[in-house]
């Protein structure tokens, strides 16, 4: 079954809407295309973050206080 385009109502900040309208006109793309691209990019970033967390799950945990103490001891702060 082919993916169907879904309609959604979103409420945009007026200045963001104005910027989107201008960008859409300048790039000959629709506001929907720009929003879809932004959402895809955001979800891709999330997926990359989750993959990085997964890769580092076996790294040892270091307490923030220990990092600060080490920075102080070495004259970095």
Image (tube, rainbow, N blue to C red):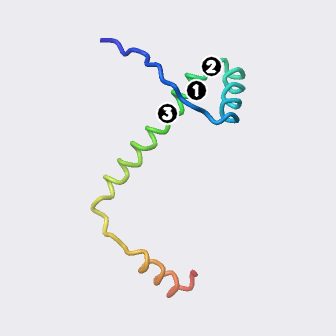
The mark nearer the N terminus, 2 or 3, is 2
- Tag of residue 76: none
Q: Which residue is mark 1?
A: 34
Q: Secondary structure at mark 1?
A: helix
* Residue lying farthest to the top in this orientation: 1
- Nearest the camera: 68 or 18? 18
Identity of the residue drawn at 55% across and 28% down = 35
Looking at the image, residue 43 sits to the left or right of residue 32; the answer is left
* Residue 33 x/y as whole percent: 55, 22
* Residue 3 x/y as whole percent: 36, 16
Q: Are marks 1 and 2 in contact (CB under 8 Å)?
A: yes
Q: Which residue is mark 3?
A: 39
Q: What is the C-alpha distance between the residues marked 2 and 3?
A: 16 Å
Above or below for 47 versus 9: below
Q: Secondary structure at mark 2?
A: loop
Identity of the residue drawn at 50% across and 36% down = 41
Badge 2: how crowded within 10 Å, few (<14), some, or many (20+)?
few
The mark nearer the N terminus, 1 or 2, is 2
Q: Secondary structure at mark 3?
A: helix
Q: Residue 47's image quarter?
A: top left
Q: Quadrant of the N terminus?
A: top left
Q: Which residue is mark 2?
A: 29
* Residue 77 x/y as whole percent: 58, 81
The mark nearer the N terminus, 1 or 3, is 1
Q: What is the C-alpha distance between the residues marked 1 and 3?
A: 9 Å
Above or below for 43 versus 52: above
Q: Residue 60's image quarter?
A: bottom left
- Nearest the camera: 67 or 4? 4
Badge 1: how crowded within 10 Å, few (<14), some, or many (20+)?
some
Identity of the residue drawn at 57% across and 81% down = 76
């Amino acid at each position: 079954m082919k993916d169907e385009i879904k309609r959604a109502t979103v409420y945009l900040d007026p200045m963001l809407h104005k910027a989107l309208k201008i960008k859409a006109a300048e790039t000959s793309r629709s506001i929907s295309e720009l929003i879809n691209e932004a959402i895809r990019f955001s979800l891709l970033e999330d997926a990359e973050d989750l993959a990085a967390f997964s890769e580092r799950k076996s790294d040892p945990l270091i307490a923030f206080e220990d990092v600060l103490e080490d920075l102080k001891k070495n004259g970095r702060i």
